[in-house]
Amino acid sequence: MTQSAHEPRERWLSLIGIGEDGALSPTARALIEDATLIVGGARHLSLIGPTTAKQMQWPSPLTAAMDDILARRGEPTVVLATGDPFFYGVGELIARHVAPAEIVCLPSPSAFALAASRLCWSQQDCALLSLHGRAFERITPHLQPGRRLLMLSWDGTTPSRVAAHLSQLGFGDSRLHVLENLGGPRELIRSARAAEFSLADVGPLNTLAIELKSSPGTRVIPLTPGLPDDWFEHDGQITKRDIRAVTLAALAPRKGELLWDIGAGSGSIGIEWMLADPANSAIAVECDSARAARIARNALTLGVPGLDIVAARAPEGLAGLSPPDAIFIGGGADARLLDAAWDALPQGRLVVNAVTLQTQSLLAQAFAARGGELTHIQIARARPVGRFHALDPAMPVLQWRVVKP
């Protein structure tokens, strides 16, 4: 017989979202009064006041509290969170250790919901981001003219840092709204253009809302693959723009997948793979230390600072890496590397580009042995010839793409 979702001992762990005003529903108040342990930030604990239960502030890192929480399994335990625990909150951490059947969650409006309601913005039309404990550069791919962003700030310095970043990238005309202590008696909303931003004494608990507006000629990261080659710092070792677009189409990135970019050069393939979706990840394997450092700079500039860079020679450098969903080899390949890449791929897509006759011969053999598709790619661009123009062909590329079942 299935137990009711409301039986307190079955669902012993209560996640309670609390707003800046400290208001609690009768159900939330009853769970707090019944608890033997209450975990939360100092601000959360001060909002609920004295209790008979033991109170514990979140340690750093938050994971250090899980042993104490799990030791109470079966006893009424409360975890306090800001707003909605499952919207950039502690809920995800809790759910990794505790089954849903053991959890009661009572959310309050999230900071995103409160900010949108104050500005009369539709949340579904906004990009919702968090800079709390995350790399600041992650906002760069979201900078699209006319778009609206809602962001959780890391601290009181975040708005001025964002304003400077926007101004540097040609978005100085964007309007920033700084919303502090939403939902409480100290709520404050102030606005300014990014290029003129001078708001001082911004509180640590703030949400940032941005209406993006670009200046003429601003470099905007497109939503399709094939960024201009000169957007990457490189020494010539780069998969060129047109070939890169075809290669990304062959790799077919899907949400949350991991790519190995072997012989990464400038990192362009791995970077564009990650730009396809914020949940995507990539490992760039590059044996040249100068190129590896260059890849890191490119990833930071283009807003994917999470790109993992392994400065090692393949296939030896592949040992111990997380299993990929797709592999790209563009920096030269031999039979040993092709075999190693195939063996390392649990299932998914393998794409290899070849320019030299020797590597093209290897791909022809691999195609005969394992199937897939073998495609000859030829790009030519117009160049002046006297008073006229002629097509100047680039070196052709032979591409082998195969899906391992």
Image (tube, rainbow, N blue to C red):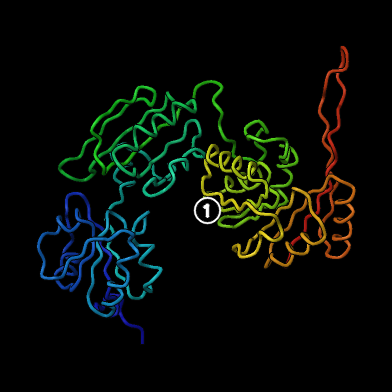
From the viewer's side, name the closer residue of 293 and 333.
293
From the viewer's side, name the closer residue of 380 and 3.
380
Q: Residue, x 34% and y 38% (percent of image)? A: 158
Q: Residue, x 34% and y 32% (percent of image)? A: 160
Q: In which quarter of the image is residue 372?
A: bottom right
Q: Residue, x 23% and y 57% (percent of image)? A: 41
Is residue 362 found left or right of 26 in the rendered image?
Answer: right
**Residue 129, x across and y down, in percent:** 41, 45
Label 1 Cα neighbours within 10 Å, binned few <14 / some 14-19 / many ≥20: few
Q: What residue type is labelled 1?
A: Ala
Q: In which quarter of the image is residue 108?
A: bottom left
**Relative height, residue 346 to residue 258 (above, below):** below
From the viewer's side, name the closer residue of 64 and 115.
64
Number of labels in the image equals 1
**Residue 222, x across and y down, in percent:** 59, 36
**Residue 33, x across and y down, in percent:** 14, 69
Q: Quadrant of residue 82?
A: bottom left
Q: Check disc 1 and report its element: helix, strand or loop.
A: loop
Q: Residue, x 28% and y 72% (percent of image)? A: 69
Point out the residue furthest to the front here.
289
Point out the residue furthest to the bottom here.
1
Is residue 369 found left or right of 80 in the rendered image?
Answer: right
Q: Which residue bears the numbered disc 1? A: 279
Q: State the quadrant of the C terminus.
A: bottom right
**Relative height, residue 389 to residue 16 (above, below):** above
**Residue 137, x across and y down, in percent:** 47, 40
**Relative height, residue 322 to residue 99 (above, below):** above
Q: State the quadrant of the N terminus.
A: bottom left
Is residue 103 found left or right of 226 in the rendered image?
Answer: left
From the viewer's side, name the closer residue of 276 and 183.
276
